[in-house]
Amino acid sequence: MAQVLEFKLPDLGEGLTEAEIVRWLVQVGDVVAVDQPVVEVETAKAMVEVPCPYGGVVTARYGEEGTELPVGSPLLTVAVGAPASEVSASGVPASGPRASGPLAADSVDEDEDEGSGNVLVGYGTQAPPARRGRLRPPGAGAAPGRRSPGSSDGGPGSGRHGSAVGAGAGAGSAGSSRAGLPDRTGVVAGRRADGPVPVISPLVRRLARENGLDLRELAGSGPDGLITRVDVEQAARAAASAPAVVRPPQAAAPAPAQSTSATHARGTRIPLKGVRGAVADKLSRSRREIPDATCWVDADATELMHARVRMNEAGGPKISLLALLARICTAALARFPELNSTVDMEAREVVRLDAVHLGFAAQTERGLVVPVVKDAHTRGAESLSAEFARLTEAARTGTLTPAELTGGTFTLNNYGVFGVDGSTPIINHPEAAMLGVGRIVPKPWVHEGELAVRQVVQLSLTFDHRVCDGGTAGGFLRYVADCVEQPAVLLRTL
């Protein structure tokens, strides 16, 4: 007999708590193999294909393209052990007493031992852990969260069908006529204190803890009563405004609030989600937490440009200008390690990092991303050129992995490609500094005592003033400028 297994959105790593469905790769009724990609999702880090750890026939999909799902919510169900001919037109196995509902995965035997190996960051499917038993109220035949609309036993299912709770609810809810109904703070009055809490995201648990909320008393708006971040935030706001005067339920909203909402509604609203939302959060946090300062200097890059031409004329893989600038950065960080660090405010310590993982800003159709070249301090110009090219292509095609977008210790930002001379970069939190490079253009320059036309570039360094003072930052920037003007200076550190 076929078993219907439920595949949930896995933990994609790096603290990601949700993903947006971009494209379904399978249809209901399709036969899938173990580790076959079934859906393409976009997170705040990258766009990835999610493989299914089960082989069988797809019986249901959850969520349309463009829908955001929290980690742990159902993606699809698969009938394992049933040929496609045994699956009805609706995608439900023709046999199996528990294959009729969207959560028929409860029929999985606890000794199930199928697995597909580690296929995603932070996600493995070697042997599914034993399923925890679901607590049911005495005499109840259905699991919490899936009761019929007429249920009035005060469980979580009642809170989702509050309109069906009538006179009979008082008798079946231990003396409370409001059992299972959410009050104005989003609290469910009749939820069992000994039942499982429908929360998956650690972020949601921490947010509830910080606001002094009991998750067992919240009504979840997610699939099957899953408590989301929005639920916790709404409950926290309601709790904060509880002392205010309570208006009758039918009272109309104040006129000023309506006019304000109408004013906002006249503009075009663009959701801050995915990559754009992640960038907004990180930049806001950087400005909020890091006391940054910026210094800059003009440098004559003529000799550096000549050196690159000679390197490429010598044969072998082409060397990019970005790779040469990156090599200069790693040499400068070896002399000024204060700028390759991070600040631990809880311990009140500056942590100097041993390895240089160099991030570089890349503009894509999905927005600004910062791929990271791991162990850049161990690479030469050729290796850096190849890695920059690989990561840039992956950024353009949206195939960067979360591991390739995290872990940076210093960022190089070449905004000269946009045709601008200078900028004041915002530090990529939690790093301590970022070097910005403007366009290289011919300008009048005093060279060897005479006025000449030279290739000039503006270099700017934004640094965290907690890790060093201006003397260190100025020394770093001056060393970078000296290497740009006289590439032979690098030979002293090679």
Image (cartoon, rainbow, N blue to C red):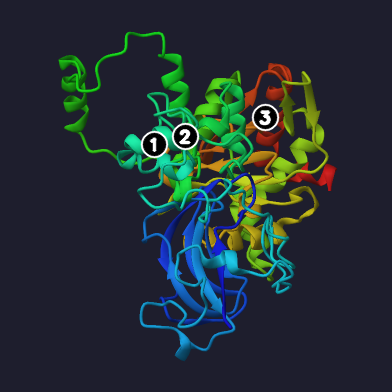
Would you place residue 297 above or below residue 68 in this image?
Answer: above
What's the residue type where badge 1 is placed?
A: Ala
Rate crowding at label 2 as few (under 14), some (14 to 19) or many (20 or more) other CA atoms within 10 Å: some
In the rendered image, residue 346, in percent from the top left (x then y), is placed at: 74, 21
Q: Identify the residue position indicated by label 3 in the image.
A: 432
Question: Marks 3/2: CA distance?
Answer: 57 Å
Q: Residue at x 52, y 56 (%)?
A: 141
Question: Marks 1/3: CA distance?
Answer: 59 Å
User: Badges 3 and 2: C-beta atoms under 8 Å apart?
Assistant: no
Would you place residue 406 above or below residue 410 in this image?
Answer: below
Q: Of the numbered discs in the image, which one, if any, rests on residue 173?
A: 2
In the rendered image, residue 445, in percent from the top left (x then y), is placed at: 52, 33
- Left or right: residue 368 versus residue 200 is left
User: Badges 2 and 1: C-beta atoms under 8 Å apart?
Assistant: yes
Say what secondary structure mark 2 lies in.
Answer: loop
Is the N terminus in the top left, top right, bottom left or bottom right quadrant? bottom right
Does residue 446 show up? no
Say what secondary structure mark 1 lies in.
Answer: helix
- Left or right: residue 125 versus residue 413 is right
Label whose residue precedes the other's in the sequence (3 or 2): 2
In the rendered image, residue 42, in percent from the top left (x then y), is placed at: 48, 56
Question: Marks 2/1: CA distance?
Answer: 6 Å
What's the residue type where badge 3 is placed?
A: Ala
Q: Residue at x 41, y 77 (%)?
A: 91
Of circles 1 and 3, the one toward us is 1
Q: Nearer the viewer, residue 297 or 401?
A: 401
Q: Of the numbered discs in the image, which one, if any, rests on residue 68?
A: none
Label whose residue precedes the other's in the sequence (1 or 3): 1
Q: Identify the residue position indicated by label 1 in the image.
A: 169
Of circles 3 and 2, the one toward us is 2
